[in-house]
Amino acid sequence: MYPLRRNRRLRANESIRHLVRETILTPSDFLVPLFVVEGKGVREEITSMPDYYRLSLDHLEKEVKELWGMGLCAVLLFVKVPDPLKDNKGTEALNPDGLMQRAIKAVKNACPDMLVMTDVALDPYSSFGHDGIVKDGQIVNDDTVDVLAEMSVSHAAAGANFVAPSDMMDGRILSIREALEDEGHVNTGIMSYSAKYASAFYGPFRDALDSAPAAIKDVPKDKKTYQMDSANRFEAISETQQDIDEGADIVMIKPGLAYLDIVREIRNEVDVPIAVYQVSGEYAMLKAAAEKGWLDHDAVMMEQLISIKRAGANFIASYFAKDAVKLMG
Ligand code: PBG
């Protein structure tokens, strides 16, 4: 008798497909990245990220209330720093009354239970657009780590639940953990960007924050001396393991779609929660194709997000979070 098994029985209608579906997205699968700017009443669309906005603090408060109402319970904050405040050492990052510190308080004020994660890296504060201090044409590691540790303490003091170092300097997780403990912030967690690749998919994000590496003599033009080579796989596992050994509570793989093999490998290797960042370029590609009528926006969006979760993500940092939750109904 043939065929013994008819696989199509389990695909015959939406009810059976629903019953046997292995991966389901819920609002708690998302971390919402938010871009914050100075000013009042500012809600400006980012050119290369249609339908995504830079928000001043008053709009930020409105936004987080709306997110909370939709069941979205975690945000990841980034700030756009005015040019005059930028320098090589990212001095402004340590200002207790800086934009990030005020943004953390604004979110907590609007929505006390919203989980606040903060980006820890120098690039938005750096006059050179680098995640570290530039000296003699190099990005110096250890001096940068000292600033990152201080920055993390400052975010914790302002009320951040988790700091999220996205810089890829060596040894920063341990230094940050020690600094947080020394200052009594024992409950502030660390979500480490552990396997962060030197990716061209970050272009629109750098537009959003005006943070692209500068084209200046003696300054490296890309981030390849600290972010990972996209060709490498074993390195991703050891980077991640090292961050866990240094005290990371959550590890992250970034970008998403082009690196799902890495997500699965790391999922199989480690037992801490895994975040995946579906980055700005992934968002922009779909928006552009949908605008042209070449792809079905909602269907492709959900397919991408499900793929990331199926690969092993516990949650996804995504600019599509709101759109996806709306579709869930
Ligand atoms: C900076 C940072 C970047 C992103 C998150 N944190 C850009 C970079 O490393 O140049 C990219 C996020 C995105 O593209 O959506 N430390």
Image (cartoon, helix red, strand yellow):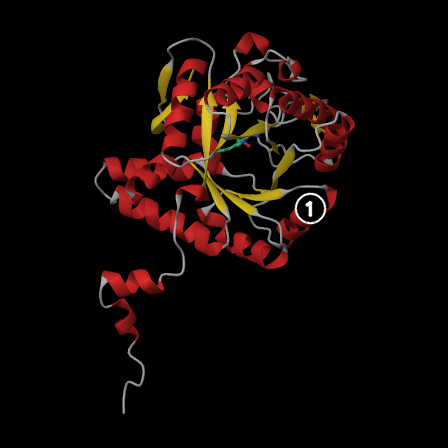
Q: Nearer the viewer, residue 119 or 81?
A: 119
The spot of residue 219 in percent (x, y) is: 63, 23
Q: Residue at x 47, y 11 (%)?
A: 38
- Can residue 228 be seen in the rendering of this structure? no
Element on which disc 1 rests: helix
Q: Residues within 10 Å of mark 1 (few under 14, many from 20)?
A: many
Counting from the top left corner in percent of width and height, residue 151 is at 67, 22
Give me the residue at 60% from left, 20% from top.
128
Q: Is mark 1 within 8 Å of ligand 1?
A: no
Quadrant containing the C terminus is top left
Is 87 placed above or below 160 here?
above
Q: Residue furthest front?
A: 112
Amino acid on which disc 1 is placed: Ile
Q: Quadrant of the N terminus?
A: bottom left
Q: Residue at x 44, y 9 (%)?
A: 39
Q: Residue furthest toward the bottom? A: 1
Residue drawn at the location 39% of the way across and 30% of the way down: 67
Residue 186 position by quadrant: top right
**To which quarter of the image does residue 175 belong?**
top right
Q: Which residue is mark 1?
A: 244
Between 285 and 59, the one nearer to me in the picture: 59
Q: Position of residue 68 (x, y in %)?
A: 41, 31
